[in-house]
Amino acid sequence: MTVTFEDAITRYDPVLGIEVHVELGTRTKMFDDAPSPAGGTEPEGANELVTPVSLGLPGALPVVNGAAVEHAIRIGLALGCQIAETCRFARKNYFYPDIPKNFQTSQYDEPIAFDGHLDVELSDGTVVRVEIERAHMEEDAGKNTHVGGADGRIHGASHSLVDYNRAGVPLVEIVTKPITGVGERAPEVARAYVQTLRDIFRALGVSEARMERGNVRADINVSLRPSPDAPLGTRTETKNVNSFRSIERAVRFEVARQAEVLDGGGTVVQETRHFHEDTGTTSPGRVKSDAEDYRYFPEPDLVPIAPSREWVEEIRASLPELPAARRRRLQAEWGYADAEMRDVVNAGALDLIEATVAAGASPAAARKWWMGELARTAKAQEVALEELPVTPAAIGELQALVDSGRINDKLARQVLEGVLAGEGSPEEVVTARGLEIVSDDGPLLEVIDATLAAQPDIAEKIRGGNLGPMGVIIGAVMKATRGQADAGRVRELVMERVQG
Amino acid sequence: MSTIDSAEVVRLAGLARIDLTEDEVTRLAGELDVIVQAVATVSEVAGPGVPATSHPIPLTNVFRDDVPGETLDRDEVLSQAPEAEDGKFAVPQILGEDA
């Protein structure tokens, strides 16, 4: 490919559409009481968490999980959506081994939530409003493992293995309206949008929302048009992009690829594409069926859902503080500048600093530790901040030792080193390594006397009123006490000694 | 007026993975057309004040508590499958890499 993203963006206006699936963390599945692998039940093996409903056995009847409906409403409300007064499930018919009933129970013309929006903050503080078309409930499919064609273990043909543990896990699918006007920032907007959603899912407590476990999956639609005034171009849908970095890369790749097709006078084919992590490229999957080919029709085995307005308001009142509001509140409480706050958020230090402040440290001190010494250590070890073997409580304790004057900043760094090395709590490290500031004048005077005696010339000069060489004496005393003396106090004591 | 022709029957049969002979297609086109017209007649009677019915029983919000129940025994489950491997159902590869 010769066209780069940077090149493409100078000639085309990208339009995004993002579909995010989130697995709800309810204990059981959407339509049956099998324990859900997304709800804290770790299956012992494949096909351990299945019932006749998960397997689509003849005669099996679904019953809606009320908790999943509540979770869906929570998500809808958090995204500023309207909640349907009545809605129903529909069958989406298609044949594929991961869906044993030959239809997915989903919602079609009557989603539970619609017409919302989400304000997404980019790394430089720019806020982009993403309009939400709808959020609907459905069930997850089973998992296929494709076995290579060459091994011939079944009838000499390549085959797939299917595990239905995931079949029936409650999902909410959130669909945006076309995201326009973001230009060269399209990849970043796509990433930030999904990240913001992930944070909201966690804050709401509706899902563990772990990307690496497939709790959150994104399908990215991209189209290009020659200018913002032109009608929307033909889009492609890149399926199951499952890391934040991949989302950015997939958008970049598709923009460049489509630009090259259009440059050559060709037309973009409306299709599903697959993203390849290793190369950062996409390749065509099956040609997307028209929606009508799914032959949606109302699910006759489930009655409509009509959330009462009282219930909806009850849920609204129980919504926790959402991440954006929390960031604004904490920034105001802590008095951080905008840039400082952004750095903290981008470094993933917000929770750690909040807990450190809760442990007694001042916001400034907490930020200094996490964004300074600890950030450097994490970077050197190539781990995330929260993976460092130190708790916010320990940092709070460390800062308390500094604040009380028992150690100074320099000693505190040594204490931290000990804590990170697994030597115990800050207090324990101070004791074990003997790092406390010598506050008792007795031992300090002994060192001062010895130092003065060892350097009689300098002692004489100071005695004669020449304070120039005072630093030499203080330095020697500090060295002898391994930095554990308070320099100001040493100076006072030296003056007393020479004058006394 | 005929709304279901042979081509439509062939398309629907393809979507539903049903193999039909030419005779069956012709016969079904006629039969399905009668059904569609009968439903159309009902639509004429129902005025704008009659909401569309997807369920005959006027019930809503039938929910289950989020409490785990019994699951099936895996060996029993897999005993129903033509082929199984590693505790999973083994099926022919049908759509390439599309997962």
Image (cartoon, helix red, strand yellow):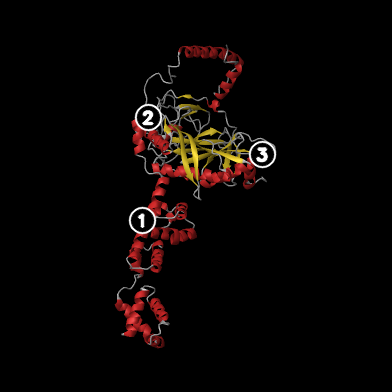
What is the CA distance from the residue labelled 1 to the residue labelled 3?
54 Å
Looking at numbered disc 2 in the image, what kind of residue is underneath it? Pro
Q: Which corner quadrant of the image does residue A42 belong to?
A: top left
Answer yes or no: do the residues labelled 3 and 2 have beta carbons within 8 Å?
A: no
Q: Nearer the viewer, mark 1 or mark 3?
A: 1
- Of mark 2 and mark 1, the one earlier in the sequence is 2
Identify the residue at horizontal 39%, vertical 60% (top origin): A365
* Number of marks present in the image shown: 3
Specify the amino acid type for callout 1: Val
Dots 1, 3 in contact, CB < 8 A: no
Q: Measured from the top left, where is residue A77 in percent x and y?
A: 41, 36
Read off the residue under disc 2: A307
Which residue is most to the right? A264
Q: Output the chain of dot 1.
A: A
Q: Is residue A245 left or right of residue A2?
A: left
> Looking at the picture, how far across and down is residue A219, in whole percent?
53, 38
Residue B90 visible: yes
* Quarter of the figure with the N terminus of chain A: top right
Q: Are marks 2 and 1 on the same chain?
A: yes
The residue identified by callout 1 is A357
Q: Chain of mark 3?
A: A
Pinpoint the chain carrying mark 2. A
Could you say which is closer to the camera, residue A82 or residue A441?
A82
Q: Secondary structure at mark 3?
A: helix
Residue linked to disc 3: A261
Question: Is residue A188 toward the left or the right of residue A166 in the image?
Answer: right
Q: Earlier in the sequence, mark 1 or mark 3?
A: 3
Q: Does mark 2 fall on the same chain as mark 3?
A: yes
Q: Give me the residue at 42% from left, 32% from top.
A: A82
